[in-house]
């Protein structure tokens, strides 16, 4: 991808620190690296979310063991995996700028994309089966379907990235038509999927969908974000700088807000419900013991 790499490599002992990447005199500026503010905007929310998950990890594991919900255990584990990969992706943006790190960066980007996409597709597929809280067979069926879809998507991206040398995950490549063409197809498929669910919801077949408001709020939000991403990719493919800004904005929103949004929408109620059940049990015990009897 980069010719005459020796021209860009600094002399031994003069490799700049991460804090020097955005300085005008740094040789890394020739790769148009993102500045520290961009990395901070991506990394800080990712770190905070992982810290939040870690802070509640012990309590949540106890609740999962008590309820024995295979569905919640699977999605909680997948959420953790996606959060860790997303944190690594957000924190290691500098790999785009270091010669020889292209393969590592592409592999990390593929793994991060695989984790979030698997979570995104499997959530919709499982909820459409109307078995939100139980059903090991339904869970296996859902992950088999989503696994095939995600596997095909990642395999196609890997072929384009490593086989045809398409700079799919390189932000400095802004005019490569193959890159934007692949992203347009990817975002178009996701947008059409969410649009179909919304269409069914407002049609005579709405009874076939789960009557959960949180599910439709999730679908509406994802339809909007994928639609904006599709719009930005289209503009970027046409050579408009505004399209790059739109797409970069969507990338920041997705990598900082998607996983917390999933947790709040689908998982937090499960753990809070356990607290409410315990509170009701304690209240019943105290009532039976006569603590609330009037003298």
Image: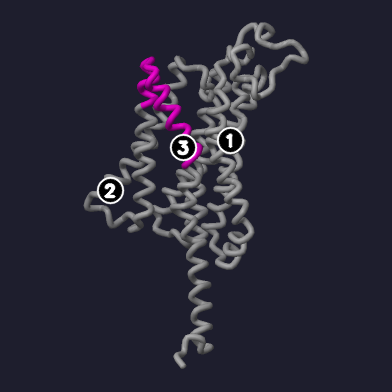
Q: Is residue 246 above or below residue 290?
A: above
Q: Does any portion of residue 201 appear in the rendered image?
A: yes
Compute the Cα span from label 3 to label 1: 16 Å
Say if 40 sits above or below 68 in the image. above
Q: Is residue 54 left or right of residue 220?
A: right
Disc 2 and disc 3: Cα gap in Å?
25 Å
Q: Identify the colour scheme used.
A: one colour
Regarding mark 3 in the picture, which secondary structure is present there?
A: helix
Residue that numbered label 2 is attached to: 200
Which residue is outermost to the left? 204
Question: What's the residue at 35%, 27% (across, down)?
Answer: 231
- Residue 148 visible: no
Q: Which residues are magenta?
A: 232-257
Q: Nearer the viewer, mark 2 or mark 3?
A: 3
**Looking at the picture, how far across and down is residue 246, in whole percent?**
39, 27
Numbered tag placed on residue 190 in the rendering: none
Label total for image? 3
Location of residue 103 by image quarter: top right
Pointer 3: what residue?
254
């Amino acid at each position: 991808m980069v010719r005459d790499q020796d021209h860009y490599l600094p002399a031994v002992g003069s490799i700049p620190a991460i804090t020097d990447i955005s300085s005008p005199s740094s040789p890394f500026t020739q790769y148009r690296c993102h500045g520290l503010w961009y990395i901070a905007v991506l990394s800080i929310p990712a770190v905070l979310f992982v810290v939040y998950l870690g802070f509640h990890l012990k309590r949540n594991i106890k609740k999962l063991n008590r309820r024995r919900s295979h569905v919640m255990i699977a999605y909680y584990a997948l959420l953790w995996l996606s959060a860790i990969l997303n944190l690594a992706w957000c924190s290691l943006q500098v790999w785009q700028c270091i010669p020889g790190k292209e393969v590592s960066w592409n592999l990390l980007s593929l793994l991060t994309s695989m984790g979030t996409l698997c979570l995104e597709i499997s959530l919709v597929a499982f909820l459409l089966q109307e078995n939100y809280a139980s059903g090991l067979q339904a869970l296996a069926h859902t992950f088999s379907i989503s696994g095939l879809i995600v596997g095909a998507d990642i395999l196609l991206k890997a072929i384009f990235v490593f086989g045809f040398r398409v700079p799919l995950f390189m932000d400095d490549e802004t005019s490569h038509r193959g890159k934007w063409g692949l992203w347009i197809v990817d975002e178009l498929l996701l947008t059409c999927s969410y649009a179909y669910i919304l269409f069914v919801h407002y049609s005579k077949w709405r009874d076939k969908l789960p009557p959960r408001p949180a599910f439709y709020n999730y679908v509406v939000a994802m339809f909007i974000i994928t639609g904006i991403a599709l719009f930005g990719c289209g503009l970027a493919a046409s050579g408009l700088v505004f399209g790059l800004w739109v797409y970069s904005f969507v990338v920041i929103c997705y990598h900082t807000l998607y996983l917390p949004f999933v947790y709040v929408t689908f998982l937090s109620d499960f753990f809070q419900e356990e607290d409410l059940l315990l509170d009701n049990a304690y209240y019943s015990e105290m009532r039976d013991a006569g603590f609330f009897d009037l003298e």
